[in-house]
Structures are given as structure tokens and as C-alpha cells.
């Protein structure tokens, strides 16, 4: 091994350690070397590809759109940096934005207990706690694993598809709980992937005075329910005992092929293939 390759492997040690720590706590991060990103760096082949890429290995992590670039103070410790990244990503909340076990059973028609708009705060295992804080307090409500394509844990025959009508009920009664028309309209505009100008518009006084129409609400509900159903079909829903990365590695070989969800299941760029990295609380 040449000195250049040895130096690259030495430079790789800290970024790899930081990424593994972030992933173990449900953070989202990857390695960047030059103009390339790498999700995996376990096998000799993966490491060799990194070593042969020009550039210094650094950690790349996701931040919300409204945060942008983050600069860390000089002298900050590794653990402090990790804590700040996890805080920015709100990593502790992501898992609890997905349907919990009872909600998933309702979606899969295993029970007929509908989600409720109002509930008792802190009711473990109940439907749709009224806030992220309430949901985080009860990780036992997300204990079960729901595998891609409704498969059993050992894989094999596909199961039934999640019911979109029931997911609409969940979106309205749980996901949208506490949201007003301004917030829903902002979500609708974001979903439509409008330009940066639309984001500026959404913060304007004129935008906030413009009514969120019934048609827009229906479109948003249809789109969000379809996206939730499609993600559950392709990549499942992880249990609380696993991090996003652990679930990703456990199930990525079980993902059904593009187009298997339904006849209208058309992607411009299929997001849920084997290279997709599972993210709780986010739907493509």
C-alpha cells in the first residue's frame, strides 16, 4: 500500500466513526470525498473505491431546508458536534412521525379501530398522540416490524397492500392534527415542489391571507396518503428497537421492484431501489 492510500485510510477513521455514531442514534449522514458520496464503507471493495477517489473524506449530513449551512465553532468536540447534528435533524422525533403499530394494523385492515382526533395525553399504544413529545414518550407503540411488500420477517410471498382510504383517515386525524390552513397550504406548496419563489411567497402576508381551498386540501390529502402507502409498500416501517440504518441494512434486499405497488405507480426517478437509504418520517 502506498503512502497516499495509507493517508486516505487514516483520514477515513474519524468520519467513519462520526457517521456510525450518528446512524446508531437515528441520525442521517454519509461520507463525501471530492464530488462523490458514499453510503457504505464496510467491505474491502467499498473502502478501496473511497481510497481511490480524489479528495479528503468528510461527513455529509442532512439539515432541514430552513436551516441551510451549519458552521461549528473551533475546538468543538466530536461528541458535541454529533449532538448538534442530531438536534438539528431532530433525530429523536423522526421515527414517531410514522404510523404506530395500532395505526399500521388499521392501515393493513387488521383491526377497525379508527384513529381519533382527540385523545388522552400519554396513552401508550393509543392512536395518534397529540404531539411529537407524547409520541416519543411511548416507543413501545412502535415495537413491531412491518416489512416491505407486506412480507413476513423471513421474506417470501408478498402480502396485501396498505389501504389508501385508511391512510387518508390517518393523515387527517393524526398527521395533520393541530395544523391550520396556513400550515397545510405551505405543505401543499412544498409537496408540489414549487420554486424557491414559492417558498418566499408562503412566508408573505398575502399568502397567509389567501384561503386554502377545498380542492387544494383534497389534492394534498390524496398525494400524501399515496406517498405514505407507497413508502410502506416498498420499504416497510421499522420497529423502535432499530435505527433507520439498521432497518435499511436488514430489509434492503427485500424491496419489491419499481411499479409493483399499482398501475399508476410511475416515478420519474424511482427512489426506493436498493440504493435508497431508509428515513423515518419522510415520504418520497
Image (tube, rainbow, N blue to C red):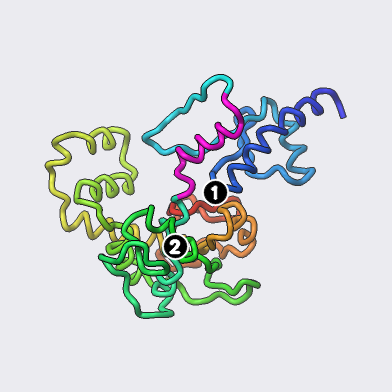
In the image, which disc is placed on residue 230? Answer: 2
Left or right of 198 in this view: 35: right
At x 56% / y 53%, what residue is drawn? Answer: 244
First of labels 2, 1 by sequence position = 1
Q: Pointer 2: residues within 10 angstroms few (<14), some, or many (20+)? A: many
Left or right of 253 in this view: 210: left
Classify mark 2: helix, strand or loop: helix
Q: Give the residue number, with chain letter if any, for mark 1.
A: 26
Q: Quadrant of residue 193?
A: top left
Q: Is residue 16 above or below residue 54?
A: below
**Residue 91 lies in magenta, yes or no?**
yes
| Viewer can see residue 235 | no
At x 28% / y 60%, what residue is drawn? Answer: 221
Left or right of 216 in this view: 156: right
Task: Give how far across and how far down residue 275 sits, in percent.
Answer: 60, 50
Q: Quadrant of residue 51?
A: top right
Q: Nearer the viewer, residue 95 or 199?
A: 95
| Viewer can see residue 55 | yes
Label 2 vs label 1: CA separation? Answer: 22 Å
Q: Which residues are magenta?
A: 76-92
Amino acid at each position: 500500500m502506498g503512502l497516499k492510500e495509507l493517508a486516505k485510510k487514516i483520514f477515513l477513521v474519524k468520519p467513519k466513526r462520526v457517521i456510525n455514531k450518528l446512524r446508531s442514534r437515528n441520525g442521517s449522514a454519509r461520507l463525501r470525498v471530492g464530488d462523490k458520496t458514499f453510503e457504505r464503507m464496510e467491505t474491502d471493495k467499498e473502502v478501496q473505491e473511497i481510497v481511490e477517489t480524489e479528495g479528503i473524506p468528510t461527513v455529509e449530513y442532512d439539515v432541514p431546508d430552513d436551516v441551510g449551512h451549519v458552521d461549528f465553532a473551533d475546538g468543538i468536540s466530536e461528541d458535541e458536534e454529533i449532538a448538534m447534528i442530531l438536534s438539528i435533524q431532530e433525530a429523536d422525533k423522526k421515527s414517531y412521525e410514522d404510523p404506530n403499530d395500532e395505526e399500521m394494523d388499521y392501515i393493513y385492515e387488521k383491526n377497525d379501530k379508527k384513529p381519533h382526533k382527540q385523545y388522552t395525553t400519554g396513552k401508550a399504544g393509543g392512536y395518534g398522540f397529540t404531539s411529537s413529545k407524547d409520541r416519543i414518550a411511548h416507543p413501545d407503540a412502535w415495537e413491531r416490524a412491518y416489512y416491505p411488500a407486506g412480507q413476513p420477517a423471513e421474506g417470501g410471498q408478498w402480502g396485501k397492500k396498505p389501504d389508501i382510504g385508511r391512510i387518508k383517515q390517518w393523515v387527517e386525524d393524526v398527521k395533520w392534527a393541530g395544523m391550520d390552513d396556513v400550515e397545510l397550504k405551505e405543505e401543499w406548496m412544498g409537496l408540489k415542489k414549487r420554486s424557491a419563489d414559492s417558498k418566499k411567497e408562503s412566508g408573505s402576508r398575502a399568502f397567509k391571507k389567501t384561503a386554502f381551498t377545498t380542492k387544494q386540501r383534497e389534492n394534498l390529502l390524496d398525494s400524501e396518503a399515496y406517498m405514505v402507502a407507497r413508502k410502506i409498500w416498498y420499504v416497510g416501517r421499522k420497529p423502535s428497537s432499530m435505527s433507520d440504518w439498521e432497518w435499511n441494512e436488514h430489509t434492503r434486499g427485500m424491496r419489491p421492484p419499481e411499479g409493483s405497488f399499482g398501475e399508476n405507480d410511475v416515478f420519474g426517478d424511482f427512489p426506493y431501489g436498493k440504493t435508497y437509504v431508509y428515513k423515518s418520517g419522510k415520504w418520497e
